[in-house]
Amino acid sequence: MESRAKFLGHPIHQMLIVFPLGLLATAVIIDVIYLAGESLIFAEVAYYLVIAGLIGGALAGPFGLIDWLATPHGTRGKRVGAMHGIGDVVVMLLFLVSAVLRADLPSEPSVLAYVCSFAGAGIALVTAWLGGELVDRLGIGVSDGAN
């Protein structure tokens, strides 16, 4: 099934999703570096990476929704797409809570801020796999004329 939201012939969702996924994953890695060494700059950098990742997710999500709405009802693609989308909303909410908890003092995140980020990253691994399942196995977003 060809993507319904394209730019220069390529699916917009697939182009944009790399940014929030990469930014949020990097935020978690930076959090681990902070926890290992306790340099305050790393905690602040992680906070800003989370903010950037949330903005990127807010931009990428609607294009995924457009493609999901065009996916035929009663298909595996529709079911996997729903799990992928709902899971990504949960990821975004967890990182949003983490950002709100960090906002007053980004250099000293609370334990709950870390729990939300790490849980969000864990769920993102699953939703990213589901996204790969949609494209690689089910052909969602793949051009009908692909060879």
Image (cartoon, rainbow, N blue to C red):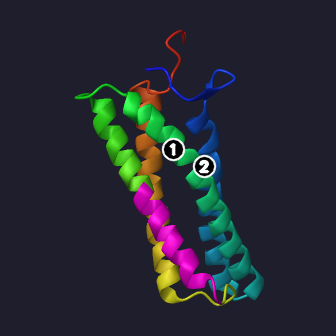
Residue at left offset 65%, top offset 63%: 26
| Res. 4 in view | yes
Disc ID at residue 62: 1
- The main secondary structure of the magenta stretch is helix
Q: Check the image and report above or below for 15 versus 53.
A: above
- The one of 84 and 31 positioned closer to us in this rendering: 84
Quadrant in the picture for residue 23: bottom right
Residue 120 drawn at (x, y percent): 46, 65
**Relative horizontal placement of residue 5, taking residue 137 as reference (left or right):** right
Q: How many marks?
A: 2
> Residue 77: image x %, image y %?
33, 31
Looking at the picture, which amino acid does disc 1 mark? Pro
In which quadrant is the N terminus drawn? top left
Residue 20 vertical placement versus 82 (above, below): below
- 137 w.r.t. 114: above or below: above
Residue at x 60% of width, y 27% of height? 6
Quadrant assignment for the C terminus: top right
> Does any portion of residue 117 appear in the rendered image?
no
Q: Secondary structure at mark 1?
A: helix
Secondary structure at badge 2 equals: helix
Dividing the picture into quarters, in which one does residue 48 lie?
bottom right
Residue 39 located left or right of residue 137: right
Residue range corresponding to the magenta coloring: 89-104
Disc 2/disc 1 C-alpha distance (Å): 7 Å
For disc 2, the marked residue is 59
Tag 2 near tag 1, CB within 8 Å:
yes
Q: Residue at x 44, y 24 (%)?
A: 139
Callout 1: 10 Å neighbours few (<14), some, many (20+)? some
* Residue 94 belongs to the span the image colors magenta: yes
